Amino acid sequence: MADERISVIKVRDILMVTMPADPDDPTVTALQEQALKAMERFEAKGLVLDISAVETLDSFFARTIVETARMIELMGGRTVIAGMRPSVAITATQLGFTLGNVMTALDVDRALDLLADAHQRRRRR
Amino acid sequence: MPKQTEITQEKHTGEGRLGNEQDYRLLVESVKDYAILMLDPEGRVVTWNEGARRIKGYQPEEIIGQHFSIFYPKEDVESGKTEKELKTAASEGRFEDESWRVRKDGSRFWANVVVTALRDKDGNLRGFGKVTRDLTERKQAEEALAQKAAAEALARRAQEILDIATPVVQVWEGVILAPLIGSLDSQRTQQLMEKLLQGIVDSRSSVALVDITGVPMIDTQTARHLVEAIAAVRLLGADVILTGLRPTIAQTLVHLGIDLAGVNTRSSLAAGLRSAMELLDLQVTAKSDGARG
C-alpha cells in the first residue's frame, strides 16, 4: 500500500521519482524497491529523485538515498537528487547527514543536464 | 431665639451630618493613600496621618517635632533643596515636586509632593500643608518600559548589523557572491547559510563564491562552520568556491591542521570568479589583441 505513494516515471532513458512532502519509512523503502525494479526493466541511464516537496530529511531517508544511488550505480546508472530546499539542506548539514558522492542539482532540468553528460560535469549550462 | 437655633444646629451636625472640624481631622488622619502632614513655618512636623505612617514608616510620636528634611536624601539636604521648597511655597503659595524621598528604614521611594503655604486671614504664615504620594510603582513601570524599549532598539540594531554584515549578491548569471566581513560566529554562519542557500535557489545559481578576504582570523570553529555551509550548498546542487585565502590564512589553516579538502579554494576573488566561469563553461575574451583577457 505504501508502494502506491511512489511512482517511477520513465522519460526516454531516465527514471524520475517525486517524493511526497513527508515520506515515512515504508515510503522510503518503497522508493528503493521501485527504483531498482524500474532500472532492471528499462535499463535506464539514470535516476532523478525530485525532493523539492520534502520538508524533513531524516537519517533513514538520507541513508536510503545514498544506498540506492550505490545500487543504481552497480546496475550501470547515475542518481541525481534534485531540488532540495534550503531549510532541509541546513538541517541535514547540522545533523551531519551527508549524501556521499550522490550528485545534486538545483532542479529537475539541471539534473537531466547532469545525467545527459554525466562524465563532463562542467556542462551545466 | 436665634441662640436656641444655633445650639440645635450644632447639636444636629455634631451627632448626624458630617462636615465639622472633627470630621475633617478624621478624614485627614484616615486617608491611607496620601501622606498628609502639616509643618510649622520652620519646617518641623506638626501633624501626621495614617498615610504618612504607611508611606514613610514613622509613628506619629517619633516624627512630630522633627524637621521635614529627614524625608530627603542627603544630597538634597546638602544642596539646600528643602529650604528652597519652603521658600517657594511661602512666596508662591504652592510648590510641587517629583523626586526620590527616604523612608524610615532608609529605602527610597519615588514621591509626588505638593507643599501649600497655610496663611491666616491677615496673611501671616501659619505653616505648610504637605501632601505626598508614593509613585514608586509607576516610576518602576515607566523605567521597565524604557528599559524594554532600549533593549528592543538594541536587538533591532544588532539584527540590522547582521543583515548588512552578510550580503549575498548575484555577480553573474549563475554566480552569486557572499563577501564575508568580520569574524564568523555560529549565529552568523547560520545566517550566512540561510541567505546563501536562499540566494542560490532564488537566482538559480550553480556557483557560489564565498569570499573571506574580510575575515580577520580563521580558527577551528570558524573553519568548521564554513565547511558546514559549503556542505549545505552542495546538497542543493551548487558548488562553492572559497576565495580570499591570503597567505596568513593559508598558514593558519595548515598549522591548525584544518582540512578543507574537497573545497574549491582560491587566493583572490578574481581568481575565484575566473574559476566560476570555467565551471559554467564560459570564457572571457578580449575584444582586441593586446588587451587582457
Image (tube, rainbow, N blue to C red):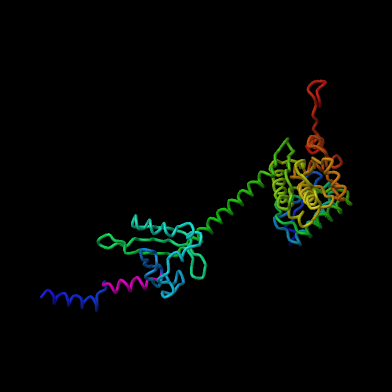
Q: Position of residue B130 (x, y in %)?
A: 38, 64
- B23 left or right of B37 in image: left
Can residue B26 be found in the magenta stretch? yes
Q: Is residue A39 above or below residue B281?
A: below
**Location of residue B1 (image quadrant):** bottom left
| Residue A40 can be seen in this image | no
Front-most of A1 and B60? B60
Q: Is residue B88 left or right of residue B244?
A: left
Image quarter for residue B247? top right
- Considering every residue shown, the one lying at the far top of the view is B289
Q: What secondary structure is the stretch in magenta mostly built from?
A: helix
At x 73% / y 55%, what residue is drawn? A91
Check if residue B52 falls in the magenta segment: no
The range drawn in magenta is: B20-32
Q: In what quadrant of the picture does the C terminus of chain B appear?
A: top right
Residue A38 position in % (x across, y down): 82, 52
Q: Is residue A38 visible?
A: yes
Q: Which residue, as the protein is rendered here, is positioned at the far left?
A: B1
Q: Please state which of residues A59 and B276 is positioned toward the viewer in this rendering.
A: B276
Q: How many marks?
A: 0
Residue B257: x and y, percent? Answer: 87, 50
- Give x and y (percent) for residue A115: 82, 43
